[in-house]
Amino acid sequence: MSHALATLDGVDQETRAQIDIVLQDARIWLQEQAVVRQEMFLRLGEAVADGNVQEARGLLTRVNAIAAHDRTDTETQTAGAAATFLSGVLREQEEAARRLNAAAEAKEEARRRTARQKTQALEQVRTTLRTLRRHGGTMLGTEKRRRVAMLTDLAAKAGDQLSRSETNQIEAWKARVQRERKTPAHVLPAQKELAPDPTPDRGRNVQQQKGEPRLYQQVARADWYSKTCPRCHAGAGRPCDNDDRVGPGRTRQLPHDERLRRVLHHSDARSRPPRQRREKRSEQPAGGTAARTWHAREVRCPKCQAPPEARCTPNETHRERMQWAAEFTRKLWG
């Protein structure tokens, strides 16, 4: 274009002067652009050498926009090196992102696995506690100790999933097993308390002496719950948990014997004189539970959940309530 303007014929002197000025300005602009282009490629090479990703990306984008054609071998080599450098950086970033994602997924999977293990351990704890509540009294000592040891391991796995009541039950069973280990196998605690007088009876027809009052009769009712229960860890003022399934409710009608003994050992416990007991043919041995005949109105109905002393709904007393009262009486009489 500039050559055609320079060799243009048939123009006057004024037009020729203007054409020469334009051509001179164009040459100056091309020289400036060549300098800018040279500096741009030089900066691009330096950015790649320094590892400056941001500057190299910006310069390569600009080079491809304004200097994509008529490149020298040096310019082509510089642009190719920049493109290779940026591609490598992109691959490294993608690989780092994949590693981070893999680590995050592994951490989340470990958290889910731990949560599943805690849930499974919690279910096993509850199953073992139910088994001990139902059969702990008749279970062999070795089997009981095995299950309590398993409870300890499962409790460690369940961690914070355990409720306070379940933790107290586990501690109570551990203490109970420890006490049974220390107690001689041939003499049970109940047998110690009920040991008969070594003095022989004068005759078979002589009436046996009445036993001492039961523990709950030796402690004033107002002091029953004045101390914490060492067995179920019920706090002062709260009834004992029904861990041995005596009665229909979640709490016992009477405190545990261990709690009553603790009250007796304190000087502030107010004992009351033993009550006169009626003679019965089927007199129950002395113990820590009220042994008497329980009627249907005195227990909670397991069908309609009517509380004690309340009528069953809608009309007459349910058969399940009468059966539960009979079962309650049977358990109390042993």
Image: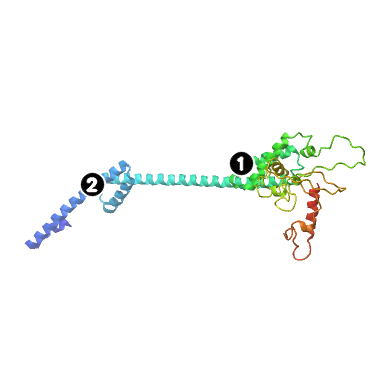
* Image spot of residue 325 (x, y percent): 79, 55
Residue 188 position (above or below residue 119): above
Task: Estimate the spatial distance between the alpha carbons at disc 2 and disc 1, rounded to whole Å.
Answer: 70 Å
- Provide residue 37's location: percent of width, then percent of height: 23, 49
Along the viewing direction, whichever of 136 and 103 lies nearer the viewer: 136
Amino acid at dot 1: Ala
Mark 2 residue crowding within 10 angstroms, few (<14) / some (14–19) / many (20+): few
Going 65% across and 40% down the picture, which residue do you hit?
152
Q: Secondary structure at mark 2?
A: helix
Among the 4 quarters of the image, the one containing residue 210:
top right
Viewer-nearest of labels 2 and 1?
1
Locate the N terminus and report the quarter of the image it occupies: bottom left
Residue at numbered disc 2: 39
Number of on-image labels? 2
Compared across the picture, whether 32 is left or right of 188 comes to left
Q: Position of residue 191 (x, y in %)?
A: 80, 38
Taking the view exactly as shown, the residue that stands out farthest to the left is 13
- Give the side of residue 34 with respect to residue 144, left or right: left
- The residue labelled by disc 1 is 156
